[in-house]
Image (cartoon, rainbow, N blue to C red):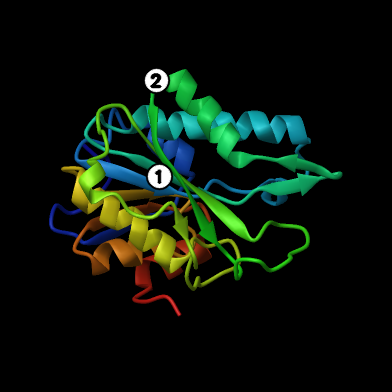
Amino acid sequence: MLTGTMEATAKRTVFCEDALDWLRKQPSLAGCSVITSLPDRSEFPRMELEAWKAWFVDAAETILSRCAPEGVAIFYQTDIKVDGAWIDKGYLCQKAAERTGHSLLWHKIACRHKPGSTTFGRPAYSHLLCFSRGVRVDLSKAVPDVLPDAGPTSWTRGMGAEACRLACEFVLAQTTTRTIVAPFCGHGSALVVANALGLDAVGIEISAKRARKASSAVRIR
């Protein structure tokens, strides 16, 4: 059961507070699945790389630990390079899942730029990783492993609309959960798509400005 002031009939609620603190107050996200994109190292300019990697794994572990067995946790993450070395965020998510006993149901690729194009700095794709304790994939409902276009987003760090749609449709088709919880929700892309598909949505965002956008967003251009 979620703590806070959310009304039982609300389609969307956004809490303006630290996402990890909010999650730690929840015994379990019963009836919910999670869709999230953990903050990049660039949002922690004073943190050393190894400290940020440890924070990332601990944050992913917190999210997974609150995910109920009937739900899934889906991470949308884009790798980075630091001093010429590749930092694989999919690997960091998997490290957290190994700590919590979650299975990796699927690992998909969402293209952020046209396949075959060359990019500099950040890669042209993002990871979509889905973990669960109790859910197992019905292969008769499988969807492609490569999403040719992650879709439009309302800000540079946001999750693409098509990636959100794939994640939400998986929740609808292959779990019994009907509420999406989005820690670090940003401008609320996952919340908007969840609502459009008939799912309730709860966002948690520490930035008051972003939380207001997430509360009022009605579509993604």
Measure how far apart labels 2 and 1 are at the Cα level. Answer: 15 Å
Q: Amino acid at mark 2?
A: Gly
Quickly name the residue at label 2.
101
Question: Residue visible at 34% across and 31% down?
Answer: 66
In the picture shown, does residue 166 fall above or below 62?
below
**Element type at mark 1:** strand
* Side (left or right) of 102 relative to 142: right
Image quadrant where one finds the C terminus: bottom left
Q: Position of residue 193 (x, y in %)?
A: 32, 65
The 10 Å Cα crowd at callout 1, few under 14, some 14 to 19, many 20 or more, is many
Depth check: give the residue in front, 62 or 132: 132
User: Is mark 2 in CB contact (under 8 Å) with mark 1?
Assistant: no
Quickly name the residue at label 1.
74
Question: Residue visible at 59% across and 57% down?
Answer: 125
Image quadrant where one finds the N terminus: top left
In the picture shown, does residue 45 fall above or below 210?
above
Q: Amino acid at mark 1?
A: Ile
* Side (left or right) of 37 relative to 15: right
The 10 Å Cα crowd at callout 2, few under 14, some 14 to 19, many 20 or more, is few
Give the residue furthest to the left. 9
